Image (cartoon, rainbow, N blue to C red):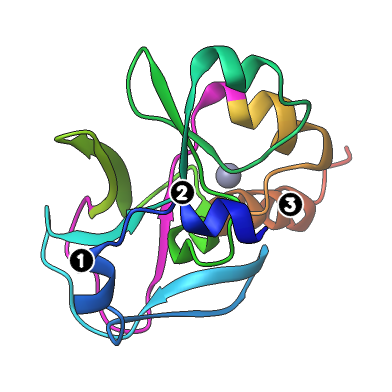
Amino acid sequence: MQSSLKTNIPSSLNSKNNNRIRVGRSSAGLGLFATDFFKKNERIVEYIGKRLTNKEVDEIKENRYLLEINSKYTIDGSSRSNIARYANHSCKPNAETDTISGRAYIIAKKDIKAGDEIVWNYGKEYFNDFIKKNGCMCVSCVNNRSDAFGAAPVTL
Ligand SMILES: [Zn+2]
């Protein structure tokens, strides 16, 4: 893991926002939480890691922390120094990822309050490969499932 750390690009945003986010317990294991207010469209954290060409990505068997930044490059965000990797998937997200000048960020999709979990939609491909078989653990899906359980079938 040391070798991948060396290739991380230092992120001034992550140093600046270090005290505005924290890793904590969530419905899906660990998650990323806001400890401060983030305004809609504000950059929260940079998704850092080694840059791989999409050809190199094809040679990797399984890695849940790949973020494609354009048609040529993908970031391998599996390093623990990449705090952005703790942000979980949600089907009703409050954040999204975007690439700005070749760097990937998690950006507030709406106003986020201190204490809120920061979640974004990982996309259809990831959902089908990793989430679908065990059921989605996002708050929205967990609530939907408990509603379905709660509604007893009407017998005549
Ligand atoms: Zn879900």
Q: Earlier in the sequence, mark 2 or mark 1?
A: 1
Label 3 and label 2: CA atoms lie apart by 45 Å
Q: Amino acid at mark 2?
A: Gly
Q: Which residues are magenta?
A: 108-125
Q: Give the foreground label among 2 and 1.
A: 2
Q: Residue at x 33, y 53 (%)?
A: 9
Residue 54 on image: x %, y %: 51, 16
Q: Amino acid at mark 3?
A: Ala
The residue nearer to you, when weighing 144 against 55, is 55
Left or right: residue 131 compared with residue 126: right
- Residue 23 in magenta stretch: no
User: Residue beneath label 2, please?
Assistant: 49
Contact flag, marks 2 and 1 (Cβ < 8 Å)? no
Q: Which dot marks residue 151?
A: 3
Closer mark to the observer between disc 1 and disc 3: 1
At 18% from the left and 79% from the top, the residue drawn is 37
Q: How many other residues sit within 10 Å of disc 3, few (<14), some (14-19) or many (≥20)?
A: few
Per the rendering, the mark at residue 121 is none
Helix, strand or loop at mark 3: loop
Task: Please provide percent x and percent y for residue 94.
Answer: 32, 55
Disc on the earlier residue, 1 or 3:
1
Quadrant where the C terminus is found in the figure: top right
Give the prevailing secondary structure in the magenta stretch: loop
Report if the CB atoms under discs 1 and 3 are less than 8 Å apart: no
- Write the residue at 72% across / 26% down: 60
Rendered location of residue 92, percent (x, y): 42, 47
Where residue 30 sits, quadrant-wise, is: bottom right
> Which residue lies under the disc numbered 1?
13
Q: Quadrant of the N terminus?
A: bottom right
Q: Is mark 1 within 8 Å of ligand 1?
A: no
Asked where in the image residue 14 lies, by quadrant, the reply is bottom left
